[in-house]
Amino acid sequence: MSVVPPEALLITVAPTGAETSKVDCPQLPTTLEELVATAQACEAAGAAMIHVHVRDAGHRPTLDLGLLTETVDALHESTDLVVQLSTGGSVHDPLDKRLKVLDARPDSCSLTMGTTNFGDDVFSNPWPFVCELYQLSQERQIVPEFELFDLGQAHALTRLIDRFGLPYGGRVHCDFVMGVPGGMPGTADALVAGVATLPPEVTSWSATGIGRTTLAVALASLSKGGHLRVGMEDVLTISRGVPVESNAQLVERVVSLGALAQRRPMTPAEARNLLNIADAVPIV
Ligand code: KMH
Ligand code: ZN
């Protein structure tokens, strides 16, 4: 049982992603210094967890293990945020490199529950890969966040838990990623259907709406008692035609929405309780 009060709202920030270029969006945090500054600003604004994609010196997405480890360490040193590394990477990353992400020892890892058309690309997550990544997260004692891009993936979570048992830590936390061209739409109706499809083992869930679905999904999630993910991985405009200035601006906006719903931001320590993540231990 979670000891976190029900009114607390987990806000996860996804500040960078792997699909937007620095040239198109100079305010995207792509260097370690920019990422740390963003993380600190978002923590101050109310975020409790950070979903991290790393870029190389040319601002390109990378799964370089040295950079991932350096990033996890830097975020642990400079913030209290729960550090979640993306195992999704970019649509071009091979499966074997995505498994290696766990070697960087994050608190949490994303784990997408199936293959999705992703615009003109394919975000590949074949069932054997899902099973291998899940078992690796159990072995390495890393708490997964199950990313659900469509309803079939919510159902696949039942199959995964039936076959391999609960995740490390015993809590089952999901994130609905809605509005990807190729996945489920970013609508209240789809969110309601998704929540109804979750297996009973789920202990918490959040939602994020891509692009113009961001507000509809955030409001629907608050209505259903869910948590929220926001960030420049998911949305680049704050209103029609107006670019997002910073990730903290997006966090501040959902803190305000949460306040209207009488939900206060969860602290990072409460998020660790919710997800049953031990205090970060330094890498030796
Ligand atoms: N970049 C997307 C193809 C994740 O981080 O786990 C996949 C993604 C999901 O962002
Ligand atoms: Zn991601």
Image (cartoon, rainbow, N blue to C red):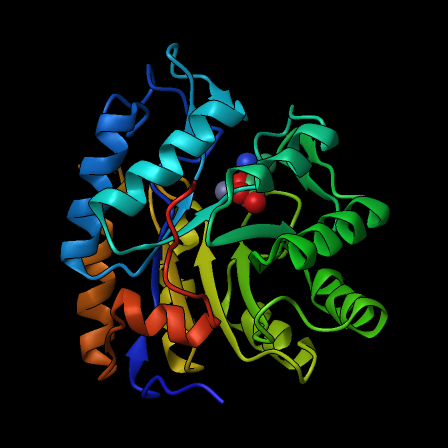
Q: How many labels does the image show?
A: 0
Q: Please state which of residues 261 and 274 is positioned toward the viewer in this rendering.
A: 274
Q: Can residue 35 be seen in this view?
A: yes
Q: Residue at x 63, y 56 (%)?
A: 184
Q: In this view, does 187 lie above or below 67?
A: below
Q: Nearer the viewer, residue 220 or 23?
A: 23
Residue for point 18% across, 37% down: 37
16 over 62 or under it: above or below:
below
Q: Position of residue 237 (x, y in %)?
A: 28, 40
- Residue 196 appears left or right of 24: right
Q: The C terminus appears in which quarter of the rendering?
A: top left
Which of the pair 60/24 is nearer the observer? 60
In the image: residue 71, left or right of residue 133: left
Q: Can residue 243 be seen from the camera position used here?
A: no
Residue 64 in the image: above or below residue 148: above
Relative image position of residue 94 (x, y in whole percent): 71, 26
Residue depicted at 32% across the width and 25% down the height: 30
User: Which of the 4 image quarters holds residue 4?
Assistant: bottom left
Query: x and y percent of residue 191 in the render?
Result: 55, 70
- Would residue 219 be found to the left or right of residue 80 on screen? right
Point out the residue furthest to the front here.
284
Q: In the figure, residue 162 lies in which quadrant? A: bottom right
Percent of width and height locating residue 180: 56, 46
Viewer-proximal residue among 153 and 157: 157
